[in-house]
Image: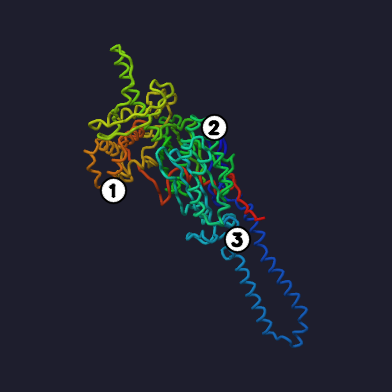
């Protein structure tokens, strides 16, 4: 990774995310030692004042008592009166100390309480029911982190609230918001060369953050913006456009909002590496499932994330010992290998990100493959009959086996460079008289390029090495995220199902309305199907990707998910955990004093 966080140590693919554990010097990435270097030291100097004052009071009382003793002996004050005065004075000092320590103050959520040992309490508006003090005096009880997911189809913000009741930060709450959906997308890349408009599009999300984070915490709540496939592809079309947008976003964050922005060298506002996107999603899922970050060494889940522009696969393969005493099989070296330290455990992950194989890109790939096939057939026919080529057929409805019967959709198809039909053509894709899911599946599999050269076997597709799912990940959970969820859950699919059941769903959807009667009992399903002619295409691509591409057995059980324990799945939480440590490239912002 060229722009890793501070918890990335060692070579490019070796990563360390260290959650704090007691008496563990290695695992200090989230120990907040840097966080408290300014806030806690400032607190410590002020917190020592009452103790010094109390010592000074005791010395002054002793001196006063010595000078007044002759008068006491003369009868001006008897012993009982002296005791009452001393008790009253002690009570007053005690009350003053209590008021001092419980008084709210700025400092990123550090509010010390002498009644709760070395821990810190929360500022007003950020209380937690989990505990009354932080696990350590070097940690605030409550911390917030902000992450903006600038995706290809829209932007989303996650406002995370953590408590430090134990040695490992616990996610307590999450606020989620997204930009309004619109045709063509509402992501940063949809604004093209208008960088300022792209930056302003995030205002609606940042307003949510301002309302969600208590004022006393805002100047110590870090924010990062991670763009994904949309901006990756924008640079291919408009050189320098992505960088201009990122610079405009950073400038707006730094001048219009109170949150500290993670530094540029730590990747605070950046186009995220697809490899990190998949691994962060894996961390999020397994952290929320309780499979990592805790004391138990439980098997982890695989995570397959399908976005709009790219798709990622991450899992922890296991290899059987080689028979007859030979060398044990292990994960081969290469960019696909991702070494990760998290919460005191070491993981050797397989990962790959396929740019251009997100669902929106897959639609275009299939439409392009269908047009190319029709063009080639017409060209061959024209040559055989000694007739000139014609493109008149592009203005007529084009039969598309991936569109449900009786439905049509006007589509702008982007073709590869040098294509004989041009760079972009606008056509009317129409479904056949009867559903042809097998034919659609064939086109979907063709876009995977399974016949590409495989230099390191075994391979998934496009010649990319991948350990066999059947041999190295046969039993553990497989979680399908993002569009996998959004294209199956609305049609009534349960949280867990087999690929065979997904195949049956696909075939029924591709039949058209005559096969949709079963969806009448699923709320909203018919409206979804009627509104999206591409449902057949989407499901066929997913089946091709999972079964043919990744090589998952047809009877393999998978799980779909959008949330676990109320928290959104995806890469954002995994990328936000390191932000709890200031070594990830941010400092609390100082309040401006009016002149």
Q: Is residue 161 above or below residue 315?
A: below
Label 3: few (<14), some or many (≥20) within 10 Å?
Answer: some
The quadrant of the rendering that contains the N terminus is top right
Earlier sequence position, callout 2 versus callout 3: 3
Say whether marks 2 and 1 touch (CB < 8 Å).
no
Dividing the picture into quadrants, the one containing residue 83 is bottom right
Rendering coords of residue 228 (x, y %): 47, 37
The quadrant of the rendering that contains the C terminus is bottom right
Real-space CA distance between mark 2 and mark 1, rounded to the nearest whole angstrom: 46 Å
Real-space CA distance between mark 2 and mark 3, rounded to the nearest whole angstrom: 45 Å
Looking at the image, which residue sits at the far top?
386
Residue that badge 2 annotates: 240
Does residue 24 appear in the picture of this structure?
no
Does residue 194 appear in the picture of this structure?
yes
Residue that badge 1 annotates: 523
Q: Is residue 252 left or right of residue 75?
A: left
Q: Which mark is in front, 2 or 3?
A: 2
Q: Is residue 443 above or below residue 317?
A: above
Which sits in the foreground, 553 or 278?
278
């Amino acid at each position: 990774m060229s722009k890793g966080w501070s918890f990335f140590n060692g070579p490019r693919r070796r990563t360390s995310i260290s959650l704090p554990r007691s008496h563990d010097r290695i695992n200090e990435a989230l120990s907040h030692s840097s966080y408290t270097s300014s806030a806690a030291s400032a607190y410590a100097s002020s917190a020592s004042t009452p103790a010094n004052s109390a010592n000074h009071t005791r010395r002054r009382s002793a001196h006063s008592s010595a000078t007044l003793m002759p008068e006491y002996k003369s009868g001006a004050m008897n012993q009982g009166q002296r005791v009452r005065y001393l008790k009253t004075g002690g009570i007053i000092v005690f009350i003053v100390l209590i008021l001092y320590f419980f008084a709210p103050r700025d400092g990123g959520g550090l509010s010390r309480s002498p009644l709760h040992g070395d821990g810190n309490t929360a500022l007003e508006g950020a209380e937690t029911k989990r505990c009354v003090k932080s696990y350590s005096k070097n940690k605030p009880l409550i911390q917030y982190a902000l992450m903006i997911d600038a995706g290809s189809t829209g932007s989303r913000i996650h406002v995370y609230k953590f408590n430090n009741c134990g040695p490992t930060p616990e996610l307590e709450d999450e606020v989620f918001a997204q930009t309004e959906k619109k045709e063509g997308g509402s992501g940063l890349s949809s604004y093209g060369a208008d960088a300022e408009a792209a930056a302003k599009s995030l205002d609606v999300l940042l307003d949510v953050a301002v309302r969600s984070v208590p004022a006393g915490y805002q100047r110590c709540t870090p924010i990062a913006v991670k763009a994904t496939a949309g901006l990756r592809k924008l640079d291919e079309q408009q050189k320098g456009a992505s960088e201009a947008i990122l610079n405009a976003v950073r400038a707006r964050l730094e001048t219009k909002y109170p949150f500290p922005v993670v530094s540029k060298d730590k990747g605070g506002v950046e186009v995220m590496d697809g490899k990190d996107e998949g691994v962060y999603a894996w961390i999020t899922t397994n952290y929320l499932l309780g499979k990592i970050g805790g004391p138990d060494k439980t098997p982890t889940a695989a995570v397959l994330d399908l976005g709009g522009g790219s798709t990622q696969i991450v899992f922890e393969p296991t290899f059987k010992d080689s028979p007859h005493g030979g060398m044990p099989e292990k994960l081969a070296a290469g960019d696909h290998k991702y070494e990760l330290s998290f919460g005191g455990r070491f993981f050797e992950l397989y990962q790959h990100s396929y740019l251009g194989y997100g669902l929106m890109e897959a639609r275009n790939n299939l439409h392009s493959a269908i047009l190319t096939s029709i063009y080639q057939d017409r060209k061959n026919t024209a040559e055989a009959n000694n007739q000139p080529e014609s493109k008149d057929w592009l203005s007529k409805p084009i039969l598309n086996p991936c569109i449900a019967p009786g439905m049509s959709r006007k589509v702008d198809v982007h073709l590869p460079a040098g294509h004989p039909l041009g760079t972009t053509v606008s056509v009317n894709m129409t479904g056949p008289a009867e559903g042809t899911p097998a034919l659609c599946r064939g086109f979907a599999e063709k876009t995977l390029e399974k016949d590409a050269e495989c230099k390191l076997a075994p391979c998934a597709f496009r010649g990319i090495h991948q350990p066999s799912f059947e041999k190295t990940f046969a039993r553990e959970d497989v979680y399908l995220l993002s569009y996998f969820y959004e294209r199956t859950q609305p049609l009534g699919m349960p949280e867990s199902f087999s690929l065979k059941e997904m195949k049956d769903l696909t075939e029924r959807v591709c039949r058209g309305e005559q096969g949709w009667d079963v969806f009448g009992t699923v709320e909203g399903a018919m409206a979804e199907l009627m509104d999206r002619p591409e449902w057949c295409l989407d499901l066929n691509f997913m089946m091709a990707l999972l079964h043919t591409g990744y090589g998952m057995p047809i009877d393999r059980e998978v799980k779909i998910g959008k949330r676990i324990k109320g928290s959104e799945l995806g890469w954002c939480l995994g990328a936000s955990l390191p932000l709890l440590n200031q070594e990830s490239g941010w400092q609390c912002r100082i309040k401006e004093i009016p002149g």
